[in-house]
Image: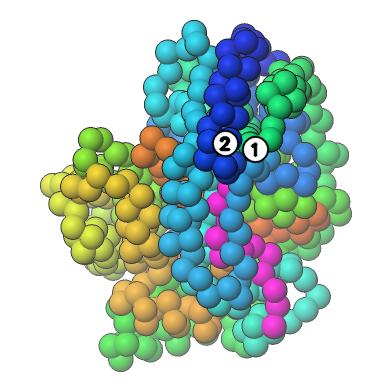
Amino acid sequence: MQVRQSVTYSSIDSKSLHDWIVKAIAKAQITGSSVLFSYSQSWECINPLLLLASKADSQQPKFYWEQPNANLVLAAAGSVAEISIANHDLSDRFDCAKKFTKTHLANAIVAKHPDLELTGSEVSIHVVGAFSFYGNGSNTNDRLDLDQQNNYQQNNQQKSWFPTLLFFIPRWMVRQNERDCTLTLNHYIQPWDNADDVLELIENLRSHLQASSNYEAPTVHEVSKIVEVEGAQIWTEIVERALTLIHQGHFEKVVLARALDVLADRNFDPFQVLHVLRCEYPECISFLLDYGGGKTFLGATPEVVLQFKAHSDRLWLRSDALAGSIGRGKTVQEDLMLGDHLLNSEKDMREHQFVIRSICDRLQSMGAAIDPQVSTGLLKLSNVQHLHTPITAQLNEPDWLIALDILQQLHPTAAVGGEPRDRAVCFMQQWEACDRGWYAAPIGWLNGNGEGTFGVGIRAGYIQGDRARIFAGAGIVANSQVENEQSETTIKFAALLKALGAL
């Protein structure tokens, strides 16, 4: 990320804001409970990622989302409400997310600057966050201790970096699309609050964000060590074991992940790493979720597990089937040849059909009507190309929060889990050298307007100080070749390794 100045401008209407605060306090007094108050106004921001890097406190949770095909950027920090479920908590993380969202949005007051003509999406309260890959109670190891033996038994004794659910309503958020940029400020109003005091708090935050700022990326680091995380067996041996079980009929497909620990001579800058990713992979969704205290999960995913939008009493749904991979050619002719080989590969098309079938079956189990599918095509990224089939559906349902139930049904799809799912996931959890945490799990956002998007947290890794752990997976099916699958993961590692300065 280049050092540059970020300048924001806004028009201030303190009288309008004060009037809305008075209304919120009155509602809190009538109900005898706190009220979530949200105020949106027009905003100009040159670079939301730079704004987030320069204005967010290091101890605050932070969220960044850049989805080029939707012309959408979200940059948010702070928290007025959050839910974090620890790894040992056996609560249903999707149900908890649903209850959290419903509780906090139910009686909220959503206001906007009187001169704005914004859509509901632009002034809605947003909830952002992520789920873990495995269900609650699974054991994880995310300490990134390069000196320890990273086998399965030791992983069981470690505490997780990341909770199995983290959802929060940010204190401030910038939402930018191709037409507008909006600043939303959130605050919980208490019955005993004084309107002038609340106004001052909100104005101070707005002034802080409005002030010009410079952000200087840390001195360039050098990667000093890259170590593969290994358990009792190396990855290729685990693939061989999986192939044996596939041939015996235990499951049809399993996705096995490798992990690399990357150590540098000084701290990584997560914003700089993400900036490289977003420039290298403009077709992907760039995301960053910082739990606070310098623990960051980031990546650039090409895959959406669920996108939804409520309209009247119907819910529009979309999920990407993405499986089957091959590298990019050095010339146009070689690239076309590789893409054609992928489209005609019996092994890759079989793997892709597993994913299509798993998504369609689970959407239909929730009562959704699947739209006629478009033909499978190629999604070309800078270093890899995938078989890709977008799946859309519609559901007659007035309560859009059912989207979180659908998300629970979809995760994990056969693209990152396996088929049959339960048997494949059990094998993964037992034999992968380290738990995935948020890797390959849903990460994204939703809002009170009944829309949201959750990507699959792939092409991703964790950063803490001078250490990073990155992941790459490959789908193993009956005629997989161990060497080819290892090569596929090596190609996928390249995205994060380059962003970390290791290539």
Q: Is residue 320 left or right of residue 19?
A: left
Estimate the x, y position of residue 449 in percent, counting from the top left: 38, 35
Q: Quadrant of residue 121?
A: top left
Relative to residue 186, is residue 429 drawn left or right?
left
Q: Residue furthest bottom?
A: 248
The residue labelled by disc 2 is 28
Q: Tell which of 348 and 58 is nearer to you.
A: 58
Magenta span: 157-168
Tell me the SS state at disc 1: loop
The kind of residue on which mark 2 rests is: Ala
Dominant secondary structure of the residues highlighted in magenta in the image: loop
Label 1–label 2 contact, CB within 8 A: yes
Image height of 208 relative to 150, above or below: above
> Which label belongs to residue 190?
1
- Residue 200 seen in the current view: yes
Tell me the quarter of the picture where residue 468 sits.
bottom right
